[in-house]
Image (spheres, helix red, strand yellow):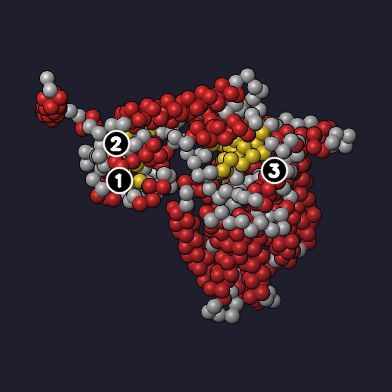
Amino acid sequence: MTRRSLLALAAAAVAWLELAAASWPAPAAAQAPARIVSLVPALTEMLFAIGAGRQVVGVSSYDTYPPEVERLPRVGALIDPDVERILSLKPDLVVIYGSQTDLRTQLARAAIPVFEYRHGGLPHVTGTVRALGVRTGHAAEADELADRIDARLAAVRARVAGRERPRTLLVFGRERGALRGIYASGGTGFLHDMLEAAGGVNVFADIALEAVQVSTEQILARRPDVILEMRSTDIPEGAELEREIRAWAPLASVPAVQRGRIRIIAGSGVTVPGPRVVDGVERMAAVLHP
Amino acid sequence: MAGVRRRLVTVVPLFGLGTAAVLLLAPTVGSTPISLRRVFDPALPWADNVDAQIFFVARLPRVLAGALVGSTLAAAGVVLQALLRNPLATPFTLGVSAGAALGAMLAIAGSLDVGALGVSSVPLASFAGAVVGTALVYALATSRRKGLSTNVLLLAGVTLNSLFSALITFVQYLVDFSDWFRTARWLLGNLDVSSYGPLVAALPLLGSAFAAFAVLPRALNLLSLGEDVAAGRGVDVARAQRLAFLSASLATGAAVSLAGPIGFIGIVVPHLVRLIVGSDHRIVLPCSLLFGAAFLVLCDLVARTVMAPVELPVGVVTALVGGPFFLWLLVRKT
C-alpha cells in the first residue's frame, strides 16, 4: 500500500472512531475539558505544570503562580466563590475544594462537572497530579511530572537516610519580631510529611493536627535541635532577617537557639502543596543535613 | 461609714489573700512538670536550666499578664457600669476595645513592622486603635453640652462598636487565608506574651488608671444614684465622669492590646463580687480588681493545661467557666 492510502485509511479510522464515540452516550466527565476554572491555587499550579494551562480560563483570587495566571479572570476563593462569574466563563470543569459544598450543589444544578480536592499528605500531591492529568487529557505529562517529583523526593530520602534526624520545630506563622502567635505544624499534613522526607523529626508529631498554636512553654519543654520557619509572604531580608532570628533568643535553653540552628525558608511557593513542594523538601534537607 | 471601714480591712484583705495564693500557685502548674528546686538553683547556668526558663520566660510573664489584664477589665467593668448606670455595660461596650481590635487587625493584615519599647507592632497598633476609639467617643459625648452626656456616650459608643466591628469583618474579608486565621485567633485572646517588655510598657498607663480608680469610688456611689443627687452632694459630676471614662477606656485599651479582647471578665467579675460584698463601690472596686486578676489567671491555667499540649483560647474558657457559674449564682441568690 502506498503511504497516501495508509494515511487515508488512518483518517477514515479516526473519523469512524470519533463518530462511534459521539454516538455512544459517554459520560461528560470522560471528555477532556476545554474550559477549566480552578479555585485551588495548588491545583492551578499543577494544571499549568502538566500542560493544561491553556485550558484554564479562570482562577481564584489567591492565585499568583505561574505568572500566566495574572491575566486570567478571578472568581473568588475558598469562602467567597463568585458563582455568577464562574458560570459566565462557561467552564466544563471546575476545580473546587472539598469543603465548598454549596458551590458543588450550585454547579451540579448547572450540570457543570467538578474536580474535588482536599489537602492531604505528601503522597497526595503526586496522586492529585496524576488524577488531574487523567481528568484533563494530559495523563502522560502528568505521570511524567509526578514521576519526576517522586524521583527527586526519593533522591532526598536516599541522601538523608541513615543520618541522625534532628528534632525540628516547623513554624509557618508568627507575629513579627516577637514570640507571639506561633503556629507550627502538627503531626499530619504535607508540611509534616515534607519535614519527615527531608530527614527531620517533627517535635509536635504527636499532635494529630495540621496547625497548632504552640506556647513558649511547649517549645522550651520539647527542646528542638532546629527551628525552621516557612514564610510565603512578608519575607524578611538583611537586618530584618537577623532581627527575626534574634526574636528566638529568649528561649536560651533550646538547643536550636544555643547552636544558632534557626533558619527561615522563604519563597512564594514554600507552603503550597503543588508541584513546587519538592523544592521546599530539598531546601529543608539542605538545612537539616548540610 | 465605720461599717465600710471595717469591711475594707476585713473583706478586701481576704480577696487579696485569695488572689495572692492563685498568683503564687499558677506559675508552678503547667503542661510540663518542672522542679521548683531546679528553677531557683543558682548553681545551674541560665542557658541550660530548662525549668527556670519555663518558669521565668514562659509562665511568669503569662501569669503577670493575666493578673494585669484580668484586674483591669474587671475594674473597668465596675467603673463603666456605675458611670453609665447600666448593669449590662462592659469594658467592650463603648467601642474602645473594638477600636483596639481594628488596630490589631490592620497590623496583622498589613504586616506592619513598627516595634518600639519592647512592644511588637500588633499591640502598638492595637493600643493606637483604642486611643482613636476613646477620642472619638469622648468627642461625640462632649460635643453638645459642657459635661459628659452618658446617654450620648452609650449610644455613640455602641454605634462606634458596631462600626469598628464591621470594619474588622471587612479587613478580615480582604486578607489572605492564613492571615484571616491569625486575625480570628487574635480576637479570642492570648496571654502568652513570652517577655516582660509589653507588661512594663503597659504599667505606667495601667498605674495611672488604677490611681484614678482609687479616688473614684465615692463619686461612683453617688453617680449611680443619678447625676443630680451626686451634684447635690458636692461631686464635681463632669470631672468625675471624665476621669471615670478616660481611665476605664485607656486601661481597657492597654489590656486589650496586651492580650486581645478577652470577654466575660468585665461583666461576670463585677456582678459576682457584688453578689458577695454588696454594692458599695469602695468595696466592690478593689475586690473586683483582685478577683478579676485571680479569675483570669485561673482561666488561663485551665486554658494551657486542660488539653495540653494543645491550648484552648483563653476567651473560650472565661466564657465557658464564667457564664454558667454566674447564672448559677444569680438563680441561687434570688
Q: CA distance from mark 1 to mark 2?
A: 15 Å
Give, as a three-letter code, the residue at label 1: Val
Do marks 1 and 2 both belong to one polypeptide chain? yes
Residue B295 shows up from this direction: no
Q: Earlier in the sequence, mark 2 or mark 3?
A: 2
Q: Residue at x 23, y 29 (%)?
A: A30
Q: Secondary structure at mark 1?
A: strand
Q: Secondary structure at mark 3?
A: loop
Q: Quadrant of residue A284?
A: top right
Which percent across, then down, holds residue A117? 37, 34
Q: Secondary structure at mark 2?
A: strand
Contact, CB < 8 Å: mark 2 with mark 3?
no
Given this view, does label 1 or label 2 mark the residue nearer the observer?
A: 1
Q: Quadrant of residue B9?
A: bottom right
Q: Earlier in the sequence, mark 1 or mark 3?
A: 1
Give, as a three-letter code, the residue at label 3: Trp
Question: According to the image, label 2 marks what residue?
Answer: A114
Q: Earlier in the sequence, mark 1 or mark 2?
A: 1
Q: CA distance from mark 2 to mark 3?
A: 45 Å
Tell me if mark 3 has few (under 14), some (14-19) or many (20+) residues whose alpha carbon lies within 10 angstroms of its own. some
Left or right of residue B232: residue B39: right
Which chain is home to disc 1? Answer: A
Quarter of the image with the N terminus of chain B is: bottom right
Classify A167 as above or below A213.
above
Give, as a three-letter code, the residue at label 2: Val
Which chain is home to disc 3? Answer: A
Q: In this rendered view, identify the residue nearer to me: A169 or B143.
A: A169
Question: According to the image, label 1 marks what residue?
Answer: A57
Do marks 1 and 3 both belong to one polypeptide chain? yes
